[in-house]
Amino acid sequence: MSKAKIASKNNPEGRGQAKEYFHNGRKIKPVKLIASGKSFFAAEYEDSGELVLSQGGQTISWGSAKNLS
């Protein structure tokens, strides 16, 4: 009897395609932001490198930004 082959978790063919996220029609990516002694993942526009801001001028967290897209 032969053993069944177990798929490797590191096999690139077994991985899914990465999802792209957009905010206001522009592609965004996560970045780690360290400010005022706190660190969290924020959203950044991929084309310009600018942080994604709310209407009040506050930095939007990655979790909030990707759910708004």
Image (cartoon, rainbow, N blue to C red):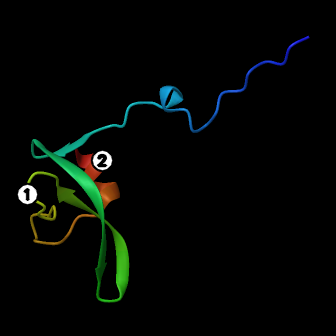
Q: Residue at x 37, y 77 (%)?
A: 39
Circle 2 residues within 10 Å: few <14, some 14–19, many ≥20: few
Residue that numbered label 2 is attached to:
67
Q: Are marks 1 and 2 in contact (CB under 8 Å)?
A: no
Task: Tell me the quarter of the image containing the C terminus.
Answer: top left
Q: Pick the residue in front: 40 or 6.
A: 6
The amino acid type, in three-letter code, at marker 2 is: Asn
Q: Is residue 32 above or below residue 8?
A: below
The answer to whether 13 appears left or right of 59 in the picture is: right
- The count of marks equals 2
Q: Quadrant of residue 65?
A: bottom left
Q: Pick the residue in front: 7 or 60.
A: 7
Q: Give the number of the disc on residue 66.
A: none
Residue found at the far front of this picture: 2
Q: Residue at x 66, y 27 (%)?
A: 7
Residue that numbered label 1 is attached to:
48
Residue found at the far bottom of this picture: 37
The answer to whether 22 appears left or right of 8 in the picture is: left
Q: Is residue 24 above or below residue 51?
A: above
Label 2 secondary element: helix
Label 1 secondary element: loop
Task: Tell me the quarter of the image containing the N terminus.
Answer: top right
The answer to whether 50 appears left or right of 65 in the picture is: left
Q: Earlier in the sequence, mark 1 or mark 2?
A: 1
Instruction: Point out the frontmost of discs 1 and 2.
Output: 1
Q: Residue at x 33, y 37 (%)?
A: 19
Q: Position of residue 15 (x, y in %)?
A: 49, 32
Q: Is residue 10 above or below residue 40?
A: above
Circle 1 residues within 10 Å: few <14, some 14–19, many ≥20: few
Q: Position of residue 46 (x, y in %)?
A: 16, 52
Q: Position of residue 60 (x, y in %)?
A: 23, 64
Q: Residue at x 20, y 50 (%)?
A: 28
